[in-house]
Image: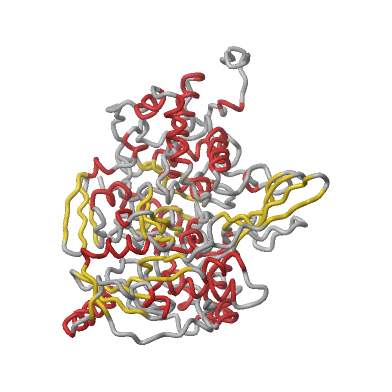
Amino acid sequence: MSEPRDQIREHARRLLDEGKVEVIIGYEKGSVPLQSTPCFVRDADNVERLIWDSTCGPNLAKYLFDREGKTGIVAKACDARSIVVGIVENQIEREDVVVIGVPCEGVIDLKKIDAVLDGKEILEASMDNDKVSVKGDGFEQILSKKEFLCDSCISCRHRNPPVYDILAGDELEETKESDEFEEISKLEAKSPEERWNHFSKELGKCIRCYACRNVCPLCYCKECFVDETMPSWCGKTTDLSDTMTYHIIRALHIAGRCVDCGACSRACPEDIDLRALTKKVEKIVRELYDYEPGLSLEELPVLGIFEQDDPQEFIK
Amino acid sequence: MILRSSSNRSVVLKMKEKTIEKKDLSGFIDSLLEEYQVFAPTIAEGIPRFDRISSSTQVSLDSPKLERSPKEVFFPQCETLFTYQLIDGKMTMEEPPALESERVLLFVRPCDVKALTLMDSVFTSWEPKDTNYLDKREKTIIVGRACSRPWSTCFCTSLGVDPFGKEGMDLVFEDIGDKYVVEALTERGGKIIDGSSLFKDAEKKDLENLKEVSKKATEAIRSELDVKEIEKKLKAIYDDSFWGKVSEKCVGCGVCSYLCPVCHCFDVQDEGTELKGKRVRIWDACQYPIFTLHASGHNPRTSSRERIRQRMMHKFSYFIENFGELACVGCGRCIKGCPGNMDIREVLTGIMATEAD
């Protein structure tokens, strides 16, 4: 069996040649070592641009919302789950999308790599199955990929896309090595004051660049509440009250929808612990409704339906 | 007081170069703290940025990442323009007080100082001058730091910025190993080292070393771009399909603008009630959907195609028309910061290679 990358290219070429899709959205090599960049291929002669490796972090499902025409998309498991959410929420037409699903062993977190290099800049990098080799002025280091995966990949329970039209690569065995909610349990064990301090410190770093919102496929509101101007719903400053309002409402708005792809955390220029909020909300939804979003096209959005036996202890 | 704007920068002096041992640097900084408010590169919550310091120990010159630009020292992300209050039927309005004392901003890279001179053009070269900005700028002595360690994403030399350039600085520190060569470029710069026994006259050997270091740094800048007459090119391709393609991957966040040392667009908001409140100005970003939303509800820039074009037109065409210079210094912060790795060097190369439809 050929490499997933070659299979992606092969399928992309065929889909474009046969006129099944107008464009393939995938990844290509970025301009900075260990970074990929979204790539839109319309000509079958250009499929060689497409890559697949552990740098393919951005959640490409973002580009399916508001798109017209038949589109092929390279989707790792969490991207595919976001696509499913988009379909069940009637934002994406199933028949307009050809999902080239890719089983995924996790993507690397560049911030974690930068942290161990202590200021040395990577000028060249290469990867194999479990190693990342980085080179720069006067240094060369081989890192174990596993240690530098994104937090959301470490706790990932769905490495295989639940919905796809074509699968590139072999299905992977699902892992449950660590406790998915370990970090959240640690936060829950803290006193309210300690938790307040944690969230004040983290959300206090926010510069309101909205990278977290804009890379999130599920933040597709035509007008985000923070952009409301007449009247203004939320202050636009970086005062803690404003930044906290923004992040808390965003987390609540993606409750029962967030698939923990980690795109928001990777995009944040201030390295804010955004998952402390989103993963907690995910945990609450799991506990209340035993529900995980993005796994089935048959299931309606959990907070979009009502059932007689829904938990309602919160109604006092 | 010296009026700072790119057209009439303070007189450049030619003073004899001095040197200071690196081990003496903290002594110098601590002596400055006795007299001035001092801002310097620090690391706050893992992010290197310019901040007010109270001790030399907070200064971080070998930060693991390229530090945030110092624009917030002059143009804070949120700034109160005035406060108002209704007392006994009478409305009182108050502007924030001017700075009481002089400040020193330490160790700014040449590209970032160049960026400040470009912001000067915007905020101070026409009437009315922006008093909030001007006050901070006039009362701040700029101590530059020659850039002996460019990053791989730097492309300043392609835009006419020299990593050892001194434009806009009052004083410059140039790293030659175990010491710095220090050169006062203005009287104000000279004033803060005058009388300090930590500075010695530079020897011939030091200046030779400096030449060597400067040559090495310039060679270390790997990116070379040709943006000659880009403003003409941009006008010619204004309606080109190029913009649709190049903007496709932009998700419309504000990272590039907020990390940029030159971007200076802002939004003005009123916060409070009819009895009490304030008017604040807040950084804005041209990639936001509501950046040009009119009160009527009309928005002339409805998609990332128009927004990316605006970003490039502003930096590489309109700014030249208005002030004769490019509004990009090639620091590369936007390249590493962009969550989609949209690389401004590639956009520029694409612009130059595009023949109008």
Q: How many marks?
A: 0
**Residue B26 drawn above or below residue B174:** above
Q: Is residue B299 left or right of residue B210?
A: right
- Image quarter for residue B152? bottom left
Residue lying at the far bottom of the rendered structure: B14
- Image quarter for residue A149? top left
Q: Is residue B322 left or right of residue A71?
A: right
Residue at 60%, 61% (x, y): give it.
B266
Where residue A179 appears, x then y in whole percent? 32, 25
Identify the image's colour scheme: rainbow, by chain, secondary structure or one colour.
secondary structure
Foreground of the two, B28 or B175:
B28
Q: In this view, does B315 lie to the left or right of B175?
A: right
Foreground of the two, B96 or B117:
B96
Quarter of the image with the C terminus of chain B is bottom right
Residue B142 in sight: yes
**Residue B266 drawn above or below residue B275:** below
Residue B357 in sight: no
Where residue B60 appears, x then y in whole percent? 31, 57
Foreground of the two, B67 or B52:
B52
Where residue B49 appears, x then y in whole percent? 40, 57
Residue lying at the far right of the rendered structure: B89
Where residue B277 appears, x then y in whole percent? 69, 47
Residue at 74%, 43% (x, y): give it.
B273
